[in-house]
């Protein structure tokens, strides 16, 4: 689900996109379990996400991590983190208990008796297994959808197994217009709202901004360079619009993501539109962090009112602003993730959370029906499905197990999301006319997996860890020393 522009002349369009993001990218999912400051968790940073907060008597707030939240019926609790596994990429992880805080809690998920006898709760997990599983499956669905629905269908090619899956599974489920990858973007955005919000609250605006920059930007630059190389060589990466000729203005607009509001839209990394949404969400979160600390319900109301204000003014400032308003509708999805986080942490009542979720979805439906920009097609159905599956997955978390395969895929989700369009498509373009189609697809997928692994090990993870070290460093002493040196030289 990329910015759904339906314009003639587009060479290849990414109709399904994700990230990190989250953390669509943007989208982080590896828990940091070190005792260091909580600056990079995106899976296990969720404050006891699989259980309600403990009663005040059970609170064990870690020094420097307690957050005063007057809107919560009970004081927010934080717990010291323990040692992190190598390669963890998220900050501020906390141990996630698989058991509810109290057997009598009305917040506990009660499975039917016949199912409870067959499923044993999994204890002592170090990660939120559902987030890992969801991210991995979402990334796979995006690659599948772009391969089948954009590359193969766009060239009139057919691969028996993929056509069978479409005919008997995905089309009957309602994903006939864009493939099952349409559900992946909302899932990534929900994850961003759920796990990034407590990170911002604990880190503060400046440190959070630095952390997010090193999380999403270095790998995007790598994907962007690969896309430019493919364009120069004539190997057709997954793009939106007409990438040629390559001009400085196009390159500049793509590097800062504002190309997605321009007319005409030209994007060398088609799936990067979700990064535009992620950046908007991060900016909004930085501005509202103080309010989230004091009153999460009020902060959510401010966010919803901002979205309504943009919708109401969509026709006042020209076509580019109308395009911006259409994209802005997707900001509702990470906000819905924030609603789920606030409800799980007892910062808002469950009834209020239900109202917020329904209201947010209705706002998106309004934008879809209003057609702020005719070039954009907004799809409310995948968002509704993603919200339902997301909540059900979190409720079932205590019955899910950590698996190395899910963990490994989850850690590489952002790389898979950004790079498949700039590696898979060019390699397939070069091979499908020379080899049997099935063999060409297998070789292209292997090449994509290789590039994903290399960029994850040598670009994404090292630079993300560098950003984490920057945000963990205490700069106050250095500032005082410089001030003292300046004062002495002044004398």
Image (cartoon, rainbow, N blue to C red):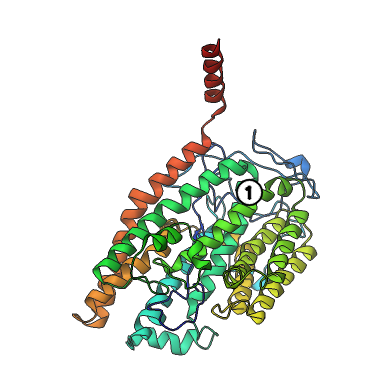
The mark total stands at: 1
Residue 424 visible: yes
**What residue is rendered at 45% in x and 67% in y?**
271
In screen coordinates, is 71 left or right of 51?
right
**What residue is rendered at 66% in x and 49% in y?**
287
Residue 177, percent from left and from top: 50, 85
Residue 32 visible: no
**What residue is rendered at 27% in x and 76% in y?**
429
Q: In the picture, residue 130 is in which quadrant?
A: bottom right
Residue 136, percent from left and from top: 46, 64
Q: Nearer the viewer, residue 346 or 327?
A: 327
Please identify the residue farthest to the top as the structure is shown.
491
Label 1: few (<14), some (14–19) or many (≥20) C-alpha neighbours in 10 Å: many
Q: Secondary structure at mark 1?
A: helix
Please identify the residue farthest to the left as the structure is shown.
434
Q: Nearer the viewer, residue 33 or 153?
A: 153
In screen coordinates, is 87 left or right of 369?
left
Q: Nearer the viewer, residue 172 or 379?
A: 379
Q: In the picture, residue 238 is in which quadrant?
A: bottom left
Residue at mark 1 = 286
Residue 226, percent from left and from top: 31, 61
Residue 444, percent from left and from top: 28, 71
Q: Nearer the viewer, residue 369 or 139?
A: 369
In screen coordinates, is 230 left or right of 197?
left
**What residue is rendered at 56% in x and 41% in y?**
207
């Amino acid at each position: 689900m990329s910015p759904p522009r339906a314009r003639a002349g587009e060479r290849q369009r990414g109709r399904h996109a994700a990230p990190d993001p989250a953390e669509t990218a943007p989208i982080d999912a590896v828990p940091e379990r070190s005792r260091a400051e909580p600056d990079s968790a995106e899976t296990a940073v969720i404050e006891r996400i699989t259980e309600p907060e403990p009663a005040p008597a059970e609170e064990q707030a870690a020094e420097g991590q307690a957050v005063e939240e007057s809107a919560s019926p009970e004081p927010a609790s934080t717990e010291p983190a323990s040692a992190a596994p190598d390669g963890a990429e998220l900050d501020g992880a906390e141990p996630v208990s698989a058991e509810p805080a109290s057997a009598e809690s009305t917040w506990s998920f009660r499975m039917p008796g016949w199912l409870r006898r067959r499923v044993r709760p999994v204890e002592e997990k170090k990660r939120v297994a559902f987030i890992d599983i969801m991210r991995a499956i979402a990334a796979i669905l995006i690659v599948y959808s772009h391969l089948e629905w954009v590359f193969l269908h766009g060239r009139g090619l057919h691969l028996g197994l993929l056509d069978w899956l479409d005919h008997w599974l995905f089309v009957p489920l309602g994903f006939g217009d864009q493939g099952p990858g349409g559900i992946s973007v909302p899932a990534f955005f929900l994850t961003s709202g759920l796990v990034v919000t407590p990170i911002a609250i604990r880190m503060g605006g400046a440190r959070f901004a630095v952390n997010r920059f090193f999380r999403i930007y270095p790998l995007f630059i790598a994907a962007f360079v690969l896309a430019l190389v493919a364009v120069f060589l004539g190997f057709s990466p997954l793009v939106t619009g007409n990438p040629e000729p390559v001009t400085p203005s196009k390159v500049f607009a793509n590097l800062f993501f504002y190309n997605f509001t321009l007319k005409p839209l030209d994007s060398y990394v088609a799936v990067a539109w979700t990064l535009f949404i992620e950046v908007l969400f991060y900016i909004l979160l930085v501005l509202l962090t103080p309010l989230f600390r004091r009153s999460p319900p009020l902060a959510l109301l401010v966010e919803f009112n901002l979205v309504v204000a943009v919708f109401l003014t969509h026709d006042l400032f020209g076509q580019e602003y109308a395009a911006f308003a259409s994209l802005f509708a997707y900001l509702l999805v990470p906000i819905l993730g924030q609603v789920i986080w606030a409800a799980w942490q007892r910062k808002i009542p469950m009834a209020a959370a239900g109202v917020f979720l329904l209201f947010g979805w209705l706002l998106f439906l309004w934008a879809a029906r209003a057609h702020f920009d005719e070039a954009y097609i907004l799809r409310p159905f995948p968002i509704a499905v993603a919200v339902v599956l997301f909540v059900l997955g979190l409720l079932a978390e205590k019955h899910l197990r950590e698996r190395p395969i899910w963990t490994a895929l989850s850690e590489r989700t952002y790389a898979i999301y950004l790079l498949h369009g700039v590696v898979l498509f060019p390699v397939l373009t070069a091979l499908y006319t020379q080899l049997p189609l099935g063999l060409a697809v297998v070789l292209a997928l292997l090449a994509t997996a290789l590039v994903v692994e290399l960029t994850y090990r040598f670009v994404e993870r090292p630079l993300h860890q560098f950003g984490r070290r920057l945000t963990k460093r205490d700069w106050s002493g250095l500032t005082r020393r410089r001030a003292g040196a300046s004062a002495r030289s002044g004398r």
